Image (spheres, helix red, strand yellow):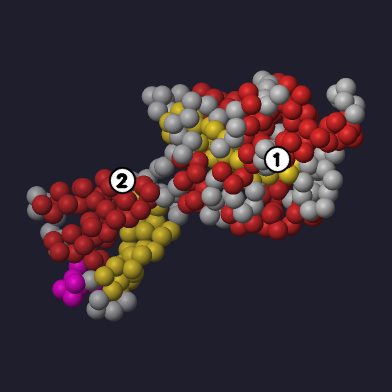
């Protein structure tokens, strides 16, 4: 846990702030000479203060470099106690609004928001979208043997999913085909949960002369499928290429780790979901979060709301710990508010 900023002397606070700001701007270790022109102290005196800041765990010097960089603890102290976040730049506000305000499906607007954040922050833009249950277009079964069949589900959005269904030995291929025909004729256009409930009701009330055992098997399968979809995150990530910036060649292992981590949609979704209840932006710095500890990356995320004021998703940025927090935090916050207005 970062120590309170009040425990630093005015001189330590000033030098610490200059070191962090220089590092975030240039991305390289900061030596005493680099900040000597910004403060009325000799380089030797500055080095002495930097050494004390290092002993407090706020700065470190990588490899054999004489310059210092902030630790994750130091960055947290800077973000919470020193950083002055500015209002989003008018040009950036216009670009974000232009991208998401066009007449387009909400999914496209969310993808546009992610792309806009990525381009403006030069990091990866991420959006955790509202979960939408799959709407059924067609269901069919392909018998594999007496005990198994392949269920093929086609969604209204054109997506296709396959699943192996275990049979009880009494359910015939003909019975499964009858149930599938009934679903396609009568239940297409419903969500999986709605189709499951309607199928059970039809069988219970004996409105349809379909095999009850086969119908129960299919209804159970639809229920499981619906449950899986409800738990599956809808994650939009844009701007992987932005992570390969001019400094990437000096830290290829970190960049490779981050690119690998961005493939873990489930884990990223969990991380973003932890920002659901935040009143504004939430910042995760480097090793503070287990997922990005290896790559030393930071996440800035903020929730956006639906028409009833409920949190429906999270938008944010993932990038190196040397993100320009003072600029990116208000940018993410503005994007979240713009998406909230769009959802209203």
Would you say the magenta stretch is mainly helix, strand or loop? loop
For residue 64, the mark is: none
Read off the magenta span.
Answer: 168-175
Dot 2: element = loop
Quarter in which the N terminus is drawn? top right
Foreground tag (2 vs 1): 1
Horizontal side, residue 306 vs residue 177: left or right? right
For disc 2, the marked residue is: 190
What's the distance in space between the residues labelled 2 and 1, CA to CA? 63 Å
Residue drawn 75% across the image and 41% down it = 69
Q: Nearer the viewer, residue 297 or 273?
A: 297
Dot 1: element = helix
Residue drawn 54% across the image and 33% down it = 282
Q: Is residue 246 above or below residue 99?
A: below
Residue 137 shows in this picture: no
Percent across and percent down for residue 181 are 26, 60
For residue 55, the mark is: 1
Residue drawn 62% across the image and 35% down it = 76
Horizontal side, residue 168 vs residue 322: left or right? left
Q: Is residue 209 above or below residue 329?
A: below
Q: Quadrant of residue 210?
A: bottom left
Percent across and percent down for residue 169 are 18, 75
Residue drawn 85% across the image and 31% down it = 45
Percent across and percent down for residue 202 are 15, 50
In reply to whether residue 123 is colored magenta, the answer given is no
Percent across and percent down for residue 122 are 72, 40
Quarter in which the C terminus is drawn? top left
Q: Nearer the viewer, residue 148 or 17?
A: 17
Q: Nearer the viewer, residue 32 or 161?
A: 32
Q: Who comes first in sequence, dot 2 or dot 1? A: 1
């Amino acid at each position: 846990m970062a120590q309170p900023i009040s425990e630093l002397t005015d001189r330590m606070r000033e030098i610490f702030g200059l070191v962090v700001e220089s590092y975030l701007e240039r991305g390289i270790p900061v030596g005493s000479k680099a900040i000597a022109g910004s403060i009325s102290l000799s380089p030797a005196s500055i080095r002495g203060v930097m050494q004390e800041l290092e002993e407090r765990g706020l700065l470190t010097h990588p490899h054999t470099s004489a310059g210092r960089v902030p630790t994750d603890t130091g960055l947290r102290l800077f973000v919470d106690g020193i950083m002055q976040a500015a209002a989003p730049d008018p040009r950036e506000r216009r670009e974000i609004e232009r991208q998401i305000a066009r007449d387009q499906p909400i999914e496209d607007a969310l993808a546009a928001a992610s792309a806009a954040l990525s381009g403006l922050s030069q990091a990866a833009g991420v959006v955790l979208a509202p979960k939408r249950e799959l709407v059924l277009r067609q269901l069919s079964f392909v018998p594999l043997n007496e005990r198994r069949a392949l269920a093929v589900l086609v969604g209204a959005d054109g997506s296709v999913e396959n699943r192996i269904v275990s049979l009880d030995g009494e359910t015939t291929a003909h019975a499964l085909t009858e149930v599938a025909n009934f679903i396609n004729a009568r239940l297409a256009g419903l969500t999986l949960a709605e189709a499951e409930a309607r199928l059970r009701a039809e069988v219970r009330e004996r409105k349809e002369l379909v095999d009850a055992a086969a119908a129960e098997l299919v209804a159970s399968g639809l229920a499981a499928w619906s449950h899986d979809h409800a738990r599956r995150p809808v994650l939009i990530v844009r701007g992987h290429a932005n992570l390969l910036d001019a400094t990437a060649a000096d830290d290829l292992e970190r960049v490779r780790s981050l690119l690998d981590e961005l493939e873990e949609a489930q884990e990223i979704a969990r991380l973003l979901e932890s920002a659901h209840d935040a009143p504004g932006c939430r910042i995760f710095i480097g090793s503070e979060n287990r997922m990005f500890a290896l790559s030393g990356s930071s996440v800035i995320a903020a929730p956006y709301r639906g028409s009833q004021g409920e949190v429906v998703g999270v938008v944010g940025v993932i990038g190196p710990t040397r993100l320009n927090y003072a600029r990116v935090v208000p940018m993410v916050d503005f994007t979240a508010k713009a998406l909230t207005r769009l959802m209203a």
